[in-house]
Image: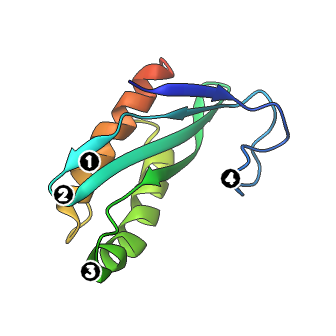
Amino acid sequence: AATAVTSSGGSSGDGSSGVSSGSTTLTGSEVNTRWGVVQVQITVNAGRIVNAGTVQVPDHNPRDVEINRVAIPILNSEAVAAQNAKIDVVSGATVTSDGYIRSLQSAIDAAHLS
């Protein structure tokens, strides 16, 4: 169950730049993985994904934090570049990548982009 929040200001409020008013922020479903919950949030403007980030990632131990510090920025960048959830998993972060892709797809579905 993805949720949508329409931004009323000049940015999405998450520190991203270049996101104008009229954009919509959608949060994907929480996806339970064996290491913890992964949840993605996207910002859509004029029918395009202009920003992607995570709301939740596994962070129960230092290894999770280390893996996600590398993997999440790659996944975020790939989601914006691809404009869909057909992105590659990050080597060494397969479980998190799979959860990310599933949550991303639910946010994209909520945005009616696919």
Q: CA distance from mark 2 to mark 3?
A: 13 Å
Mark 2 surroundings: few (<14), some (14-19) or many (≥20) residues within 10 A: some
Residue matched to label 4: 14
Q: Are marks 1 and 2 in contact (CB under 8 Å)?
A: yes
Q: Amino acid at mark 2?
A: Val
Which is nearer the N-term, disc 4 or disc 3?
4
Residue matched to label 2: 95
Q: Amino acid at mark 1?
A: Gly
Q: CA distance from mark 1 to mark 4?
A: 21 Å
Q: Secondary structure at mark 1?
A: helix
Which is nearer the N-term, disc 2 or disc 3?
3
Q: Amino acid at mark 3?
A: Arg
Mark 4 surroundings: few (<14), some (14-19) or many (≥20) residues within 10 A: few
Picture disc at residue 99 = 1
The quarter of the rendered structure image containing the N terminus is top left
Q: CA distance from mark 1 to mark 2?
A: 6 Å
Residue in front for this viewpoint, 3 or 71:
3
Q: Nearer the observer, disc 2 or disc 3?
A: 3
Q: Amino acid at mark 4?
A: Asp
Residue in front for this viewpoint, 67 or 1:
1
Vertical arrangement, residue 90 with respect to residue 88, above or below: below
Q: How is the model colour-coded?
A: rainbow
Vertical arrangement, residue 83 with respect to residue 92, above or below: above
Q: Secondary structure at mark 4?
A: loop
In the picture, residue 16 is in which quadrant? bottom right
Q: Residue furthest right?
A: 10
Residue at the (46%, 64%) spot, across then down: 73
Q: CA distance from mark 4 to mark 3?
A: 25 Å
Residue 78 in view in this figure: yes
Residue matched to label 3: 63
Which is nearer the N-term, disc 1 or disc 4?
4
Q: Is residue 59 left or right of residue 17?
A: left
